[in-house]
Amino acid sequence: MLTVQAAQELVLRHARILPAETVALEAGLLGRVLAENVVSDLDSPPFDKALVDGFAVRSGDAGDRMVVGEITAGSEWSRPLSAGETARIMTGAPLPPGADAVVMQERVQPLEGGRIRIAEPVRPGHNVMPRGREMRRGETVLRQGQLLRPQEFGLLATVGKTAVSVIRRPLVGVLSPGDELVEPDCVPVGAQIRNSNAVMLAGQIVRAGGEPHLLGICRDDIEQLRKHIHEGLRHDMLLLSGGVSAGKLDLVPKVLTELGVQAIFHKVAMKPGKPLFFGKRETCLVFGLPGNPVSALVGFKLFVHVALNVQRGVTDCLPRLSVARLESRWRHSSDRPTYHPCRLRSTPGGWFAQPLPWFGSPDLRTVCESDGFCVFDPGTRCYEAGETVAILLSD
Ligand code: AMP
Ligand code: MG
């Protein structure tokens, strides 16, 4: 059976980056990826700038100085300082011509008659950010492929880039097949259960930089599945949960194939969630996740997130594993690599993990009490307290 790593390789091989679009700086660029290089239209700072509140001076002058004025941020000042002169200056204000340093207010002794005394020698350039130190006009300040975070928003604003070319957000259809499912606002009767996967997956999609489109519940019926899947294949990605394993009513793979979806894999050696379908029709990627909530959650983190990263232009696509030491001895037994929910504790010496008692793939409640998953190897063995294990972090 396919390993998790081999399955991730297949996802990377088949997923494609989406086209770019132009988006205004104010309009939700968080987590988008730049599709162009951004060049500065100015020198920053645009003038030699005071970094502290104090007195602008000519560093070469000796003796006491005469205060000839006050310069605040945003004010214009063109009169050059002559020998022995100083101007009071505020943080962010432009230095007057002739001045080359700023002495902090606290280092200055006021004297009679509008004069000041500076006790220590002044270095040229002290407390001054020279024009263009941060960036020069015409310089590339952000490159194509950069993930946009709040700090990049600030830089875009600095260079006046108010509309920017970014990769389109993947639009993801989420379909929930299952005769037993009712919407979360219904009271289930008999063997019914509420559809918990759709909103969970929608949240994961948003976290992964995609745009979820909930397509609702669909009965385990060939005709209904055909209609809904046909609709869902119009998206950049179609995500189904349930109906993909080998049960009598697991009709999803059959209908997908019938509608022209090329199956790439259908099973991955992992726990939870062995049956996991990945396929493709033209530009639409299709994932059939297992129906049990924890299997769907983990399957998303390991595979769907990777595909969304490729589509939205992120270069570092695979989930990052951390490491932690076990709080206590833990016996693990399974024929497959296992993602087991755990609590994490941060210490100055690193992370410690406590695997939680867990009732398997339907038990989402325990996962909500956890911070991540310990990754245990297949086989039966006792992990000792203090032993290092890989950790898949929860978002
Ligand atoms: P299946 O993969 O369809 O055999 O479903 C496996 C288990 O997951 C069954 O117990 C289903 O009731 C449950 N399940 C399927 N879809 C959902 C869903 N959307 N929300 C919550 N549980 C589900
Ligand atoms: Mg089912």
Image (cartoon, grey):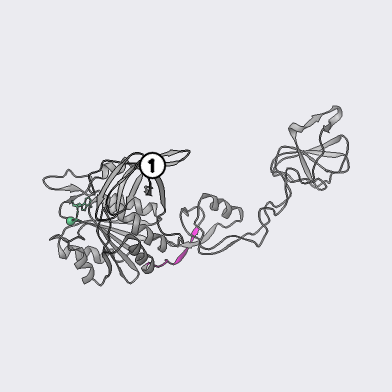
Q: Is residue 236 visible?
A: no
Name the foreground residue: 345 vs 311: 345
Determine if the C-beta at disc 1 is less than 8 A from ligand 1: no
Judged from the image, the quadrant occupied by ligand 2 is: bottom left
Q: Residue furthest left?
A: 190
- 316 shown above or below 294: below
Residue 198 in the image: above or below residue 83: below
Residue 110: image location, x then y, percent: 81, 29
Q: Secondary structure at mark 1?
A: loop
In this view, which residue lies farthest toward the top? 112
Please give the range of residues in magenta. Answer: 15-23
Magenta stretch containing residue 22, yes or no?
Answer: yes
Q: Residues within 10 Å of mark 1 (few under 14, many from 20)?
A: some
The part of the image, by quadrant, that contains residue 335 is: bottom left
Residue type beneath disc 1:
Gly
Q: Quadrant of residue 325?
A: top left
**Residue 359 position within the rendered picture, expressed as x and y whole percent measured from the top left:** 22, 44
Q: Is residue 135 left or right of residue 186?
A: right
Quadrant (top left/top right/bottom left/bottom right) for the N terminus: bottom left
Residue carrying label 1: 386
Q: Give the image location of residue 313, x and y in percent.
A: 45, 62
Residue lying at 77% horizontally and 46% vertically, measured from the top left: 125
Residue 160 visible, this orientation:
yes
Q: Is residue 342 above or below residue 222?
A: above
Residue pictured at 70% horizontal, 54% vertical = 132
